[in-house]
Image (cartoon, rainbow, N blue to C red):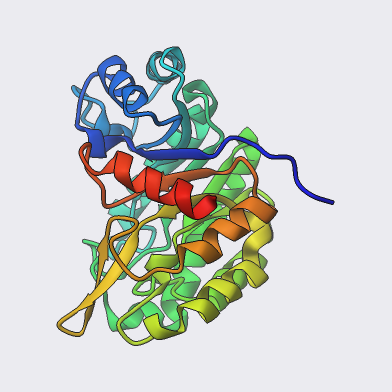
Amino acid sequence: MKQPTLPVRIGIRAHDFGRLPAGELAAKIAAGGFSCAQLAVGKAIAGITLKPGLLNPGLAFEIGEEFRRHGVQIAVLGCYVNPLHPDLATRRSLLTLFKEHLRFARDFGTGLVALETGSVNADYTPHPDNHGEAAFQDSLASIAELAAEAERFGVLVGIEGVASHAVSTPRKMRKMLDAVGSANLQVVFDPVNLLTAENHSEQERVIGDSFDLFGDRIVAIHAKDFVIEHGQLRPVAAGEGHLRHDLVMRFVVEEKPGISILLEDTTELTARPCAEFLRKVLG
């Protein structure tokens, strides 16, 4: 049965439009023609230094209300803490901060909080041990704890696979989802993040495996592109590289009508042309 035709929902990361008071930022996003955003509170909202204990229902409601007033959905709350931080006390503090985002997500007007699966380096840079079973199990313990908290509040944790992190392939993503075993754990899909200088020529397989293995769990999509320079993969804005956007957009049309597509690697000046590029791919 053919899915109903819904408006294409293209948004941006709020902090790519600056660090401003919530009302000014939401107005800017709306003026750019965007209907949704990923909001990292500490990066995007002026005057807030994010730390455990700072978030509360009133603050979350006020920020969310400004976005609602301008017709911009907070599709995702970004709280990209490192669930593999090597200092256990710091890791505990970071997980506490993420749990607070889960607790107040509904006050912001969303039900989805996102992070990546971690690096054994404190600053999230790549490390060979990220690909080992020990790192995967440590990440699993953190993600399972967050999923359990999400269940308590009726919201979702969205995890994002990255080729240099603990969940680095489509199969590892499926392994994580199965091991946690919670419907409150879902996926923010960024195909470029799963590509490297070594596997980019197999992007059709990587994208296809992703849809086959966890397409049913994808709740938001990040949109950017990539080029290969000096033997390294470099992310660029959508439409400026070699990603098979047609494969991703076909999946959106056929399997995920209405899903939020959030631009990355853009600026206030480049976001609108990137959105137009994706709309053309969508047809």
160 sits to left or right of 123? right
Measured from the top left, where is residue 194 in percent x and y?
42, 72
Q: Quadrant of residue 214?
A: bottom right
- Give the left or right position of residue 39, taking residue 73 as reference: left
The image shows residue 130 at horizontal and vertical percentages of 36, 77
| Nearer to the camera, 150 or 189 | 189
- The residue lying at 59 percent from left, 74 percent from top is 208
Tell me where residue 49 appears, x and y as whole percent.
21, 30
Q: Is residue 14 visible?
A: yes
Towards the viewer: 275 or 67: 275
In the depicted view, which residue is nearer to us: 15 or 165? Answer: 15
Q: Residue at x 65, y 42 (%)?
A: 151
Across and down, in percent, residue 3 comes to: 75, 46
User: Which quadrant of the figure has residue 100?
Assistant: top left
In the picture as drawn, the residue positioned furthest to the left comes out as 230
- Residue at image point 33% right, 48% down: 274
Instruction: Answer whether residue 96 is visible to the viewer in this image.
Output: no
Give above or below for 56 relative to 37: above
**Numbered disc total:** 0
* Residue 239: quarter of image: bottom left
Position of 44 relative to 144 (above/below): above
Kindly give the residue lying farthest to the right in the view shown. 1
157 versus 56 height, above or below: below
Question: Which residue is at the front of the view, 209 or 272?
Answer: 272
**Left or right: 24 as drawn, with respect to 199:** left
